[in-house]
Image (cartoon, rainbow, N blue to C red):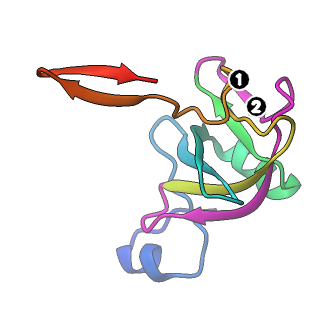
Amino acid sequence: MLWRDRAEDIENGAEFAPRFGADGLLTCVTVDAHDGAVLMLAHMNAEALQKTLETGIVHYWSRSRRALWRKGDTSGQSQKLVELKVDCDQDALLARVEVGGDGGACHTGRRSCFYRSVRLAEGQAILVP
């Protein structure tokens, strides 16, 4: 998985060549393969991506713990990879997954990490459950 220089190759070529950031990470948006619900946003380093591709179980890199993390090991909310998509410049991923366990993805026990909305009220941003 090497990075190519020409935009034409990156955008239209057939080679998967993910572009990791200066921190060695790639952003991954994870959605439920059955209904398209956005479950979470996380990051992968090269090892997490490789293990995901090898095993079919999604792995991430925890920035807070600075450790590789196979989703579901502690929560039971495993994520079986159904499809992996890469964006046009190969610096972000979209993982479509089948969720195991209780069907959730968030460490708070919720199905999705995106469980609150931000609303503007009288010029102030407020969180709405």
State the separation of the CA atoms marked 1 and 2.
17 Å
Is 90 inside the magenta-drawn segment? yes
Residue at 70 percent across and 50 percent down: it is 49
Q: Which residues are magenta?
A: 64-91
Foreground of the two, 99 or 54: 99
Query: Residue at the spot x=77%, y=56% of the render?
Result: 81
Q: Secondary structure at mark 2?
A: strand
User: Of the residues under marks 1 and 2, which one precedes in the sequence?
Assistant: 2
The location of residue 31, given as percent across then percent down, is 62, 51
Q: Nearer the viewer, residue 59 or 36?
A: 36
How many numbered marks appear?
A: 2
> Which amino acid is tagged 2?
Trp
Label 2, on which residue? 69
Cβ atoms under marks 1 and 2 closer than 8 Å: no
Q: Which mark is residue 109?
A: 1
Left or right of 34? Residue 86 is left
Query: Where 80 sits versus 122, above or below?
Result: below
- Whether 102 is drawn above or below 128: the answer is below
Q: Is residue 41 left or right of residue 102?
A: left
Which mark, residue 9?
none
Q: Quadrant of residue 33?
A: bottom right
**Identity, as a three-letter code, of the amino acid under mark 1:** Gly
Quarter of the image with the N terminus in it: bottom right
Q: Quick one: label 2, few (<14), some, or many (20+) residues within 10 Å?
A: some
x, y (%) of residue 54?
Answer: 85, 56
Which residue: 46% across, 82% down? 12
In this view, the residue in front, 20 or 34, is 34
Give above or below for 45 relative to 53.
above
Q: Is residue 82 magenta?
A: yes
Q: Secondary structure at mark 1?
A: loop
Residue 126: give x, y in percent of width and height: 29, 19
